[in-house]
Image: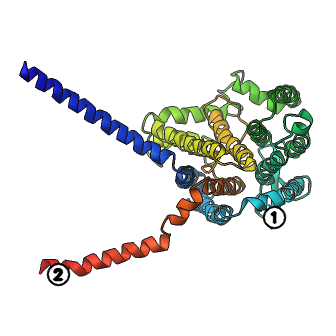
Amino acid sequence: MVQLESDTVRVTNRARAARAATTQRRGRFATVWDSPLTSYYMLVGATTMLLVLGLVMVLSSSSVDALAEGKSVYSKFLDQGLFVLIGLLPMLAATRIKLTFYLRFAWVLLFASFALQLLIFTPLARGKGGNMNWVAIGGSFTIQPSEFMKLALAVWLGFIMFRKNDLLHDWRHAVIPAIPVIAVALGLVMGGHDLGTAGVMILLAAGAHFVAGIPMRIFAVAAGGLGAFAVWYLAGSDNRMNRVKAWLGHADIADPQELAYQTKHGLWGLGTGGFTGVGLGAGRQKWSYLPEAHNDFIFAVIGEELGLVGTVAVLMLFAVLGIAMVRVIRRHPHPMVKVTTAAIACWIIGQALINIGVVIGLLPVIGVPLPLVSAGGSALLATMLALGIVIHFAREEPGAPELLKARPSLVRRSVAVVAHTVRNRANRPNQES
């Protein structure tokens, strides 16, 4: 009996110790999760990892085509690396620009982006894949103005919703001037036949309006109008209808010229990769079988070379970005920050889901890059600049500025590490003697 009681006491003590340890771990997690700097570190970490992954995969997916074109195997990788370096400067600047700047210049940024987009209707316009949404500057250098218009629209929507914050219950204030401006932006993009960017802009505007608290009946009316327009727009072009038919499985995908060709080879690449992939650089689809392997279909190359592990890692990184931006929306007190962050979140995460949906066959091929990962200068620069703005918002969460000021600077920490190393080396001979 005594032995049984002692065993019972021992088991009870172990259970209490386990519960205490679990509570302590939960306490640590809750402390880290509730920290004002958690959103900041999540944004910086996920953005950095996606940029690094993008550089690696652009090198892997573009080397074969570059060699076939008589160029260096590193040519597209070096171009992408240059764009990353160029994008770091405005991105870092955006993390320090105060909110008052956007409140003062939101209209200026919007009109500047519209003026830049209007250049697609001039002789400077350049086309690719049926889209006429690039502008040539200085000869061979081209930019895609619609990417920067997305950023300007996100900032402007945040500003206008902030100015009308107490009036949004009235449908007239909820619609004017936001809906006409959005319609003009969509019209300018559709003028270049860029359906993918127009779809992303619709997601951006919907996210901004939802977080601003627009009545749901307005969403219902807008969804009906957009649905009717989409049917009319698709029916007006054989090419667009053929893309939808290929997506629905009504195209002869055995014909390599059919529009289902990309989707078919993208799925083959994902299926070949299995769980761990065939190995970095060992993919087959990038050997001129899969068009746009380094751009719109880079997710298929990731699935083939890095397998399910690689694709899930990409999804998790975008999930981290999304969660971090939702935290900023919930925790930051300023209405403009909430709306602009929601617009940028729907833009980046929505575009990532559209790109992945196209690769895995859930959506028709509409041609949008995977943010931060696909090759391309304009999309990369605009996305980095947008994330720089959100990172600044995360730095301004309640309590975050005080923690950042209390944190030792990089120079101070580096000096401390060097001094500690020097002291250890100086003391080591004395200890040995």
**Disc 2 residue crowd, few under 14, some 14–19, many 20+, Cα 10 Å:** few
Q: Is residue 81 visible?
A: yes
Quadrant of image for the N terminus: top left
Q: Position of residue 302 (x, y in %)?
A: 53, 43
Q: How is the image coloured?
A: rainbow
Give the spatial CA distance, label 2 vs label 1: 66 Å
Q: Position of residue 393 (x, y in %)?
A: 66, 54
Callout 1: SS? strand
Q: Position of residue 394 (x, y in %)?
A: 62, 53
The residue singled out by tag 2 in the image is 430
The residue singled out by tag 1 in the image is 137
Picture quadrant where residue 20 is located = top left
Residue type, label 2: Asn
Q: Nearer the viewer, residue 382 or 277?
A: 382
Q: Residue at x 83, y 56 (%)?
A: 106
Question: Left or right: where does residue 338 sit relative to residue 241?
Answer: left
Q: Is residue 281 above or below residue 234?
A: below
Precedes in sequence: disc 2 or disc 1: 1
Residue type, label 1: Ile
Q: Position of residue 194 (x, y in %)?
A: 80, 42
Question: Left or right: where does residue 276 sit relative to residue 165?
Answer: left
Q: Residue at x 63, y 56 (%)?
A: 396
Q: Nearer the viewer, residue 122 or 128?
A: 122
